[in-house]
Image: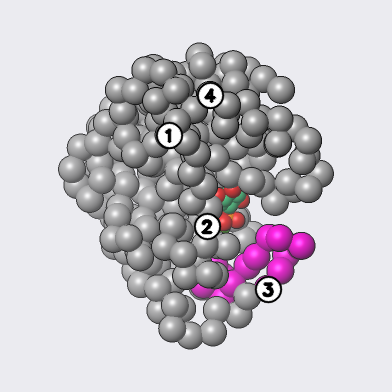
Amino acid sequence: MNYEDVLKKLDPVITKAGELIMAYQTKDKKIEYKDQVNLITAADRESEIFIYSEILRLFPDDSILAEEGHQKQGTSGYTWVIDPVDGTTSFAHGFPFFCISAGLLNDQSNEPVLGLIYAPMLNEKFTASKNGGAFLNGKPIHVSDVKTMSKALIGTGFPYNRRNIMDRLMRRLSNFLHEVHDIRRTGSAALDISYVACGRLDAYYEEGLQPWDVCAAAIVLKEAGGFISKFNGDKFDLFLPETAASNSSIHDELLSLLKT
Ligand code: IPD
Ligand code: CA
Ligand code: CA
């Protein structure tokens, strides 16, 4: 598979999906609650249906796994993992840190091989493919060279089940607040990890992410020189809910602060 060609075909689809969701900034977003804190809007639904049908048309042999329920089994050994709006809460409030995230997974190796993350309100597009480098709006990106936690700006997220894991969440947050320079929370895991990839953040962690939050960002990070693992340092797995991502240099320190 030529990943460059695949990215070229995917790019206009994700750009168009960005236009679709931006149009909702000036119309009724039809916000519904999936539960006490988890939102869905008309933009999530419309973006997903559009991306799903375009991928079906462009890559008919691939499997598809999308957050809002569109799934399809293909024969190629590759799966598109789609988040039609990552950062829906940010989106619903007009807070600009939301994006569309499309990653391609090699089913056999369970590794993301290509990713595109587009933040339409910020006009930023992160792209990467296996051994092809990582880019922001077409320019190569690289992780930071920060070497200690005391100098690090860290991203994190608070998962939707946060009320059930509050003690653990607070213990971890407290570990970090004692040691790091500072912490940011954008509300989009895909953007947070992409920001580690381009050096705006030095590390990121979250418990409870789903494959569509991380698939595309994991390859962007890897191609930019970063490292991603489970909290105990074991090999990262999209389908397991622990994400520790860093610029590589501070990964050991990140893991030790994640111990609660
Ligand atoms: C959420 C965002 C958020 C993270 C949550 C995710 P959604 O995705 O990535 O940053 O903290 O855990 O579920 O629901 O906005 O697509
Ligand atoms: Ca998401
Ligand atoms: Ca989403």
Magenta segment:
32-45
C-alpha gap between disc 2 and disc 3: 15 Å
Q: Is residue 163 above or below residue 218?
A: below
Gap in angstroms between the C-alphas marked 2 and 4 = 27 Å
Q: Which residue is mark 2?
A: 87
- The answer to whether the residue bearing label 2 lies less than 8 angstroms from the nearest atom of ligand 1 is yes
Disc 4 target residue: 179
* Real-space Cα separation, disc 3 to disc 4, in angstroms: 38 Å
User: Is residue 42 located in the magenta-colored stretch of the structure?
Assistant: yes
Which residue is more in the foreground, 210 or 65? 210
Residue 6: x percent and y percent?
30, 47
Which residue is under mark 3? 32
Badge number at residue 153: 1
Select label 3 or label 4 by which is in front: 4
Furthest residue to the bottom? 27
Tell me if residue 138 comes above or below residue 109 in the rendering.
below
Q: Earlier in the sequence, mark 4 or mark 1?
A: 1
- Mark 1 or mark 3: which is in front? 1
